[in-house]
Image: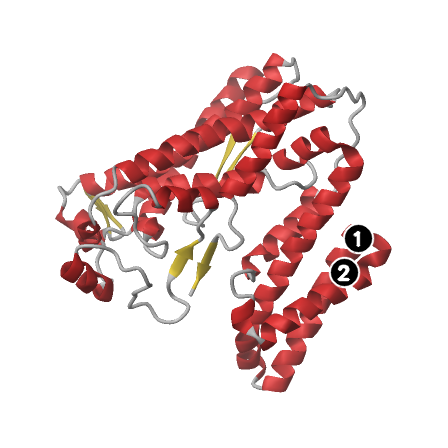
Amino acid sequence: MLTRNRYLLHAGLFVVTLLSTALTGAVVFIGRSVAWEAGDAVLNIGGIPFTTAFLADAFTFGGALIAFLTIHEFGHYIAGRLHRVKTSLPYFIPSPLIGIGTLGAVISIREPIPNLTKLFDIGAAGPIAGFVMVLILLVWAMATLPSPEYMFGVGGHEPLLDYIRATGKFPETPISDAPPGGRLTLGATPLYWALTQVFPNVPPLYEMYHYPLLFAAWLGLFFTALNLMPVGQLDGGHIVYALFGPKWHARISRTFIFMMLSSMAVGAALVLPGMLITMTGSELIGKISLWFILGAFLALCTRRVFGERWWLITLTILVLASFASAVPDALNWFGYFGWFPWCLLLIFVVKVDHPPVPLSHPLTNRRRLIGYFTLAIFILCFSIKPLYSV
């Protein structure tokens, strides 16, 4: 009965996450209200038109995203079972009407992994399987993109629509009727940028989330990069530990954390002063508050990660952030305050170091090549500013 209940739990979480992702993605992001209202009415709940067009967009997005998460997690699961390591089925995590409707999926490894070979295979199988899936989704999405007139079904966006009416194509520079700070923009990754050079009709990044399959594929890139961060026991951390050993894992993970904290601090110096000045009613107090809060947060993080050198690392990051504050355009490409929660998660929950593996058998040359390939996947999928408003 326990086994049956566990299967029901996994299946139930899968279904709830699919529904949550489909509906949240359609309502919050895709937003093709004009097209949906013109479709065949099925049901209307809370002002949401459950037309055939709405359901098609919702489940194109939700289905593609859940397919990616499933393939990624089953890559881990199958590798674990092949190595006779006790591994759970994927637990999907629904998040109704928050974010994109899901916080992803996880599996549970129910016993210590006994050697580097098994650690590497289980760690690398998920990202590689997920990357193959996301590459298929991304190429499929770009190969089937409609003409720019598709945006006429979204509603609003009048300056952009006027440009499309006049030229039949998307503008090369941003055009939007959104107020400052109200234009959601998705970050380009090296792989995404490369494919945009091949396929026509690719929408600008500040409108891409209106395209359900393309947006789901972009999120697949984002989740792949998050999992391959070379920190702690993330997939990327497992791979770096198996490839280079504990000493280089510690160095690489700390270098990456330094980059994340620096990007977060530069982003804070660019976006927080106005907010703090408004809150305090004083420019001087607002700026003092920024550097006090930022310095305290950095000290908290660097003491945990860098030990006795924490003060030097904190000072270095603060100098970099002060330079960005003085010359904002110079580091705008690098600063991303959105890394704030990820810094907390990586440092205090995931942890920066990797626990020792009991038996350390060197990886075969074939596995080392696969490991380098997964690191290349991380670079191809990573964006220093993945999702932000301008």
Q: Are marks 2 and 1 in contact (CB under 8 Å)?
A: yes
Three-letter amino acid code of the residue under disc 1: Phe
Provide residue 292's location: percent of width, then percent of height: 70, 73
Residue at 62%, 34% in the rendered image: 235
Residue at 52%, 38% in the rendered image: 224
Residue 328, quarter of the rendered image: bottom right
Which is more N-terminal, label 1 or label 2?
1
67 lies above or below 192: above
Dot 2 crowding, Cα within 10 Å, few <14, some 14–19, many 20+ = some
Provide residue 20's location: percent of width, then percent of height: 39, 40
Residue at 35%, 52% in the rendered image: 28
171 lies above or below 71: below
Q: Is residue 236 left or right of residue 90?
A: right
Q: Tell which of 342 and 367 is nearer to you.
A: 367
Q: Which mark is residue 98?
A: none
Quadrant assignment for the N terminus: top right
* Residue marked by disc 1: 306
Q: Is residue 383 visible?
A: yes
Quadrant assignment for the C terminus: bottom left
Identify the colour scheme used.
secondary structure
Provide residue 320's location: percent of width, then percent of height: 66, 67
Q: Which mark is residue 313?
A: 2
Disc 2 from disc 1: Cα separation: 8 Å
Three-letter amino acid code of the residue under disc 2: Ile
- Local secondary structure at mark 2: helix
Q: Is residue 327 left or right of residue 158?
A: right
Provide residue 213's location: percent of width, then percent of height: 32, 39
- Local secondary structure at mark 1: helix
